[in-house]
Amino acid sequence: MELKLCNHSSYPRIGDDAEHQLLRRTIAERDRGEKTDQAVRAAEDRMTELALAEQQEAGLDLVTDGQIRWSDPISHLAGKLAGVRINGLLRFFDTNFYFRQPVVQGKLERTGPLLLEEFNFAQGKSTRPVKVVLTGPYTLARHSIEENGGAGGFDKMLEGYTAALAAEVAALAGAGASMIQVEEPALLKHPYDFPRLERSITALAMSKASAQLALVLYFGDPGPLYDHLQTLPVDLLGFDFTYSPRLVDRVASNGTARPLVLGLVDGRNTRLEDPAVLARQLEKLALSAGLNSAYLSPSCGLEYLPRDRAQQKLEHLAVIRNTFLGSPA
Amino acid sequence: MSRTKLQELGIDLPLFPITSVGSFPKPDFLVKARADFAKKKIRRGALEKAERQATEFWIRTQEELGVDVLVDGEMYRGDMVAYFAENLDGFEEGGLVRSYGNRYYHKPIITGEIHWVEPITLEWWKYSRGLTSKPLKGVLTGPYTVMDWSFIEYYPDRRTACLALAKEIRKEVEALIEEGAKIIQIDEPAISVRPEELPVAIEAMHIVTDGLPAYFITHICYGAFENIYPNMLDLPVDNFDLEMSNSGLDMLELFKKHRYTKDISFGLVDVHTHVIEGEPVVEQRLRQALETLPEEAIWVDPDCGLKTRTVEEAIAKMQSVVTAAKALRAVTSTK
């Protein structure tokens, strides 16, 4: 099994020293009327460069922009669409992190690129391929509410988000994105909605051109849906292995029809995993029928960790891979 | 209502006892003192003097408003979990992580065996008690929430960490009771986010409260109550202090489906909006509560701690709660 290393999605946009507090400081100054939006964008650029550099230093094969510019995984995308206003704070799954809830007031429309500029900037600053991360249409719809008739019901809202993100996938692929990751953690809370997700992800897959499309699930056990997920028209599947001790065995016994993103390193806790334990899990997974290549990854975005610990987790990926391969770290 | 238990404890409360969740906003002079202390411009003694002054301000304010069960206002606390982590052995301060938007906090890391070394909140409770003759709640963050909002390096799993915390937090409860506290609130805002772990939270709450002579309240907010109700009623407490208004009182629908069996501190005002709900709105919320819950079971308060509001907003919101409770008391007493 070929094993590459990748970041999952987000990366801390703050650290404990002054250099890494540039963005927080600049936003606070902007909010007090002392700095401009342009200054905030410059700070975002700088923090993105630092996030990219730390991922590259950790030896990752595939990096992200760290989602440095994102307020949260929901409102950053939904808030750019026509037909949406952004409301108050709600807890994001079982974390102590809060997102702003989209309120859909009418037909959802993509009136311009959502992430294209962010991707172009990051790819221009990176020596490694940059994976683009999109919160998926189903998860966006599940975290939205409607008012004044909204989009016309949940399914219409899902269709609206799907159409908007399909157009974005096409634009990103056209701009040279080689890997587009669609995140659908909400499916694990509503597994009965698999048919809805299937329709939505199929629409996105039809827009991806030559880019690879990865469907990534986290904050739950995908085991009960595993065989269904294998039927989806995506190039990679990614899982969070921290919620079920049985998932490794399930993957090993059921096999896979496509490469996997193996979220074995806990992105929610600072404790560093025993490399020998994870190497043994990789050995099991390597025996899965059809698993010829995989990415070793954190289980979720690293924004839930302090910066120094996030960096350690990324560096740990190489240690684990080396242990798996039987060579010294 | 656990009136009998309260009476056995020597506490006589009116209909719709008025309380607050725990925190109040820090007055400007305390905000400045905390900033100066962080920059090492003033000594700890000067900071504590400002904290005492602010505590006295809120005790007096609650008395003037007509609150029945007071809190110390938590003028000496920053984050509700970090404060306890800083005062228990076994924790280290972690680096900054994001809470939302441009807000960050230092998330604690459990790096060793957790030990309660000495009373954490007791001196503040005693100080506040000396300022009022009204009942005063002891307010602690619960073991499940401290566990969930910390990184866990020392313990092998979340349950083990949670139960270890429960054993140590019980010592703080015992210290408060020994000093005379009779109403103790264990805040567990994280309890609803992993419904599958509710049994762990219940087990931990048993460790904290079993066999102790106090009226126990637990405060829960901003979660998916529908995922843990009615099983949450198995938590060994007398009163659930619940955020109700932010979610449009939708918990009442759950109570209609499955009878609510304990006392409730009913959140009558939303703490995450600058808007001061008018008296008719707040009174109507209480009337809606009365359609589903027995009047003797209802306490009233804001949805959550008021620390994110301005001093003026916090007082105005408390005033709305007080006015509604008194209006309904008058109506009920003339029935």
Image (cartoon, helix red, strand yellow):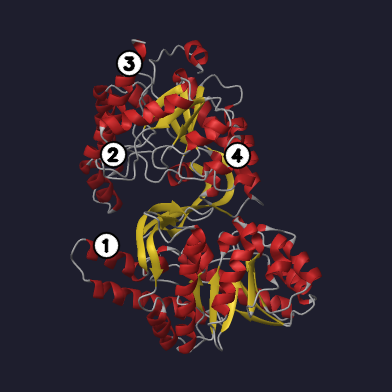
Element type where label 2 sits in the image: helix
Residue indicated by mark 1: A28
Q: Which numbered disc covers residue B331?
A: 3
What percent of the width, then of the height, locates residue B186? 49, 33
Q: Nearer the viewer, mark 3 or mark 4?
A: 3
The answer to whether residue A257 shows anywhere in this view is yes
* Location of residue B162 with respect to A274 vertically, above or below: above
Residues at marks 4 and 1 on the same chain: no
Chain for disc number 2? B
Task: Reply above or below: B300 against B154.
Answer: above
Q: CA distance from mark 4 to mark 2?
A: 37 Å
Tell me the residue that label 2 is attached to: B45
Q: Amino acid at mark 1?
A: Ala
Q: Chain of mark 4?
A: B
> Is label 2 or label 3 in front?
3
Residue shown at 45%/25% (left/top)?
B291
- Which chain is mark 3 on? B
Closer-to-camera residue (B91/A74): A74
Q: Answer yes or no: are tags 4 and 2 on the same subunit.
A: yes
Residue A184 shown left or right of residue A164 in the figure: right
Q: Position of residue A105 (x, y in %)?
A: 36, 59
What number is the disc on residue B201? 4
Mark 4 or mark 2: which is in front? 4
Mark pair 3, 4: CA separation: 39 Å
Q: Residues within 10 Å of mark 4 (few under 14, many from 20)?
A: many
